[in-house]
Amino acid sequence: MRRKGALALILTLAMLSTVGCSTPTTTVETTAAAGAETQQSGGSASGKKIFRYSNTADITIIDPDKCDSVPDATVCYHIFDGLYRNVDGDIRPAEALSCDISEDGLKYTFHLREDGKWSDGQTVTAHDYEYGWKRLCDPASASATSYIGAVLKNGAAITAGEVPPEELGVKATDDFTLEVELETPADYFLGMLSMCSFMPVRQDLVEKYGEKFGTSADTQVYNGPFMVTEFTNGRFAMEKNENYYDADAIHLDGIEIKTVADNNTAVSLFESGELDLVEVSTDLVEQYSDKVQSYYSGANDFAGPNFRNPIIANKNFRLAMNYAIDREEYNLLAHSGLYQANQRYVLPQVHGVQKTYGEEYPLEFFPLKADLDRAKDYLSKALQELSISDPSEIKLRMVVTDSDMATKEAQIVANMLQKNLGIQVDINMVPYATKNAMLVPNNDEYDIIMSGWAPDYSDPYSYLELWYSTSSYNYLNYHSDTYDGFMDASRTTKGAERMENLFKAEQTLLEDGALIPLQLREVRYMVQEGVTGLSAYFVGLNYNYMYVDKQ
């Protein structure tokens, strides 16, 4: 335990034996200062308990099948309930009271609670899950997270348009029984069921609102602890859902989210009591060192090369870029050395077979310091293969979110590539939603995109499935028969053999220079005194506000 002021930060690594995966979790405990008033900052004149925090970009969607960013997923986690819920690193039954699993691990039968209600009073049924999962995989839905459904029987074939959605391995045999068939055994499947993509969806509302479904507070219904009351540019609000079956365990009356792009402004709002939680950029950490806490977010950041560009499609050129990056210097310049420079792709902290993946499969693939000799050697080979006489002829377009920190990171990477390789890199700063919309296959709007990934569940597969050739999220347009082969093998093997196939897939990805690893992210934040019950997750979302209370 580590204390600063009145805040105590407890880091725990919970092994989820039920689902064969682990979820490192940070639980924030705060103690109100002596003589603190009953109404804390972020409350309201009516005395209601309202928890307020900020995002750097607007919430874009409240459709569980289309929540493909951490901010959106965090909201969806609080307004919907799935079969299971991740609570303090433990996968617990939510709307599933029990589950029967066949001996071969291919068939799951879920028995649902009968007191689950939507916010409009209708009962949540197994049919809502069947419809939602089929909609997730249906290519007509254009869900960016449809690749997640590949774990279900015929899921990948449906997403590819080869099989109709009706043949997905999910069926409601009655209102409260859901039968699920998997493509291959997956020890981590129950852990996946806390994800937004596997939450129920009301077919009648999708048919009523069409493309507008989930784009406003009144085009959605909610079966989770909160429901949306305001969904506008710059502001998002939720209030307690009294129809929630476990409403008595929810202490907050509501949650409000403000969009604040500038971190200095957000910190000022925190200091004035207008926010209960604020993340702190690395350049402000020293100034607020007596209040700042931290947790390991599980996110890895990388520069993603787009293989649709013929120059980037050249393997030697991609390796030249990788060896031209000084990861230690990048971390120092961008974050004062407070993040961890990254030499691989999959996070070492995710679960392996008996220990963490990193303990069982250690890897330091790319050097921390730039290796200019190797970079120039790969560049020379690339120029020859591409029939380019001078590297200055190469001009790449780099896309990045228009926040100050993201722009700073992009400028550092671009400067290193220009200085060490002699190429040209133009940076295009776009709003978060615009950049997010670019993350689809066959997009020619960028040559390099500053990106990152946080795991949906604690398994290497959560990182590696993105770059399978037919993945709906393969926005780098990477294709490797070798990589696909290892991924296919991981789906039909178990234990150490499965993990070995995943490790070989990761090695293949790095040997191909398919992306440029940069850093592992650690989040610094401050919480107002008197706030209790806040958890920060390693998997799937930033924070869990479900059980937050305010003195």
Image: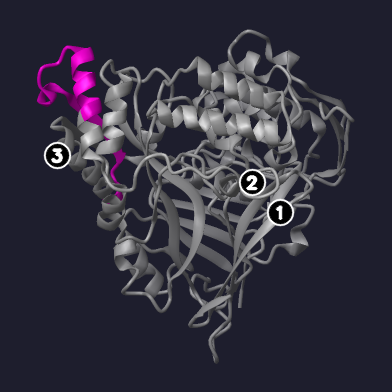
Point out the stretch of residues depicted in magenta.
Answer: 377-406
Rendering quarter of residue 156: top right
Horizontal side, residue 505 vs residue 199: left or right = left
Q: Secondary structure at mark 2?
A: loop
Three-letter amino acid code at disc 3? Lys
Residue 546 percent location from the top left of the image: 65, 58
Quarter of the image with the N terminus is bottom right
On whether residue 348 falls in the magenta region, the answer is no
Residue 25 percent location from the top left of the image: 61, 59
CB atoms at circles 2 and 1 under 8 Å apart? yes
How far apart in space, not on screen, are marks 2 and 1 (Cα)?
A: 8 Å
Three-letter amino acid code at disc 2? His
Kindly identify which residue carries mark 2. Answer: 351
Report the disc number at residue 289: none
Horizontal side, residue 262 vs residue 63: left or right = left
How far apart in space, not on screen, are marks 3 and 1 (Cα)?
A: 45 Å
Q: Is residue 203 visible?
A: no
Count of marks, rendered view: 3
On whether residue 394 falls in the magenta region, the answer is yes
Return the residue nearer the eye: 397 or 322. 322
Q: Is residue 524 visible?
A: yes
How far apart in space, not on screen, are marks 2 and 3 (Cα)?
A: 39 Å
Rendering quarter of residue 187: top right
Horizontal side, residue 403 vs residue 26: left or right = left
Kindly identify which residue carries mark 1. Answer: 15
The 10 Å Cα crowd at callout 3, few under 14, some 14 to 19, many 20 or more, is: few
Q: Secondary structure at mark 1?
A: strand
Kindly identify which residue carries mark 3. Answer: 419
Residue furthest top as drawn: 162
